[in-house]
């Protein structure tokens, strides 16, 4: 049977390895002449000892390169190089200054104007700018790298960046509660409570000083009254059939309630419009320039009105309603004239409030403020 090929050690010692397999136990192992084994250290670490001279022609029990397959050409170590072949010339630091040895600096310079900008890679400089080889010992000292205006711009930008950084740092410290807005005062917690108290105070002040729109209502006994003598002279009184129209002065008796106000308020540009309650036709106007209203009072107001209306014929309902209401009482049954009905719309402005405010009221039964003469057409 062949030797066990899984182990190189058994063949190296020229002996057969005993098999542990039961099928191979019937084959007796061959007998070889006894021989003394050599110490591996005697041949591996130095020349063989005298006790192994008799076995010089035999294979040693130590390391023997002949017992292995020839490896062929020995590969060099990766990245290795021959130091002797690539040995550099010795470096002399004084070579540029003592005119001996190689020149390590090949710098050339143009005429010096005192300003040397920072060099950036670009196109190769033309050979015409080269004035010739210049020794380092003859190179003048380096001047300023930036011009004065460039340095000034850099200083301003650096100052702005420093100010921005300080401001940002202070803002972060204030948000963390580490500093105040004015030194140690007005920290974040204090400012929060201060703003809360300020909002409450402002709300309370506005609740007392903010003016309110007064309430309007007509005098129940006499909604319309004759106009004053001065205003009565400015508006003519007539009812015509051809052309069909009418015009007369009057005054609305109003009562203003300022009980919701805590301070005196001031009304401006009070504009009044009168509409017929049955036909919704516009029949009159009124205006007051300004009015001062004391607080917590009921104020009587007489608003002058100019009633004016014009149509094409006497069959108009609005003209007939007001003509019958303003005729002389002797033409009325039982001497009592019929009443008129109208709607009054007010528009006004109040100091302290935004925009124009409006108020209105309807009157279903009111006496005409004028009475036509008995001979009126």
Image (cartoon, rainbow, N blue to C red):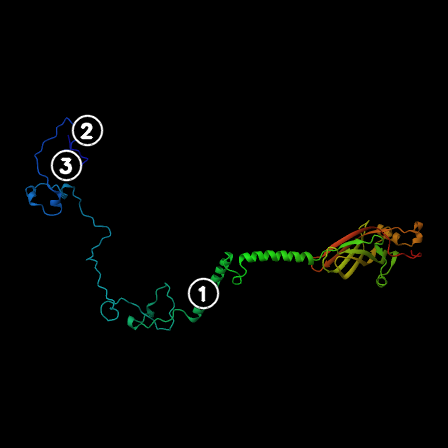
Q: Which mark is residue 21?
A: 2
Q: Which mark is residue 11?
A: 3
The quadrant in which residue 206 appears is: bottom right
Question: Which numbered disc, 3 or 1, marks the residue that appears first in the sequence?
Answer: 3
Residue beneath the point at 68% across and 56% down: 207
In the picture, measured across the screen, residue 329 lies left or right of residue 48, that is: right
Mark 2 → mark 1, Cα distance in angstroms:
89 Å
Residue beneath the point at 6% across and 43% down: 51
- The quadrant in which the C terminus is found is bottom right
In the picture, measured across the screen, residue 280 lies left or right of residue 1, that is: right
The local crowd at label 3, few if under 14, some if 14 to 19, many if 20 or more residues have their Cα within 10 Å, is some
Mark 3 → mark 2, Cα distance in angstroms:
19 Å
**For the residues carrying marks 3 and 2, which lies nearer the camera in this image?**
2
The quadrant in which residue 370 appears is: bottom right
The local crowd at label 1, few if under 14, some if 14 to 19, many if 20 or more residues have their Cα within 10 Å, is few
Residue 350 x, y percent position in the rendering:
72, 59
**Secondary element at tag 1:** helix
- Say above or below: 334 vs 67: below
Residue beneath the point at 43% across and 69% down: 151
Mark 3 → mark 1, Cα distance in angstroms:
84 Å
Q: Are marks 3 and 2 in contact (CB under 8 Å)?
A: no
> What residue is disc 1 on?
158
The local crowd at label 2, few if under 14, some if 14 to 19, many if 20 or more residues have their Cα within 10 Å, is few
Residue 337 x, y percent position in the rendering:
90, 51
């Amino acid at each position: 049977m062949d030797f066990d090929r899984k182990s190189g050690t058994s063949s190296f010692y020229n002996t057969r390895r005993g098999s542990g397999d039961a099928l191979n136990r019937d084959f007796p192992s061959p007998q070889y002449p006894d021989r003394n084994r050599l110490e591996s250290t005697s041949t591996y670490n130095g020349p063989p000892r005298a006790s192994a001279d008799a076995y010089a022609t035999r294979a040693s029990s130590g390391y023997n390169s002949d017992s292995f397959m020839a490896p062929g050409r020995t590969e060099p170590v990766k990245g290795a190089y021959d130091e002797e072949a690539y040995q550099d010339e010795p470096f002399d630091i004084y070579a540029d200054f003592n005119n001996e040895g190689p020149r390590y600096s090949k710098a050339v310079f143009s005429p010096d104007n005192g300003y040397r900008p920072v060099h950036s890679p670009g196109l190769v400089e033309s050979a015409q700018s080269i004035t010739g080889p210049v020794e380092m010992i003859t190179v003048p000292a380096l001047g300023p790298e930036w011009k004065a205006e460039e340095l000034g711009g850099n200083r301003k930008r650096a100052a702005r960046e420093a100010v921005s950084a300080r401001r940002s740092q202070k803002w972060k410290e204030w948000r963390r509660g580490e500093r105040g807005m004015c030194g140690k005062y007005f920290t974040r917690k204090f400012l929060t409570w201060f703003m809360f108290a300020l909002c409450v105070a402002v709300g309370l002040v506005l609740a007392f000083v903010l003016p309110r729109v007064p309430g309007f209502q007509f005098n129940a006994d006499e909604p319309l009254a004759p106009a004053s003598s001065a205003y009565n002279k400015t508006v003519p009184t007539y009812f015509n059939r051809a052309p069909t129209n009418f015009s007369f002065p009057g005054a609305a008796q109003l009562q203003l309630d300022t009980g919701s106000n805590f301070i005196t308020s001031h009304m401006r540009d009070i504009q009044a419009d009168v509409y017929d309650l049955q036909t919704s036709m516009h029949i009159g106007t009124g205006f007051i320039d300004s009015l001062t209203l004391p607080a917590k009072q009921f104020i009587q107001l007489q608003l002058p009105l100019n009633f004016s209306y014009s149509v094409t014929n006497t069959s108009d309902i609005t003209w007939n309603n007001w003509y019958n209401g303003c005729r002389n009482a002797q033409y009325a049954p039982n001497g009592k004239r019929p009443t008129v009905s109208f709607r009054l719309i007010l528009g006004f402005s109040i100091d302290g409030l935004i925009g124009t405010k409006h108020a209105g009221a309807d009157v279903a039964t009111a006496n005409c403020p004028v009475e036509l003469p008995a001979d009126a057409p």
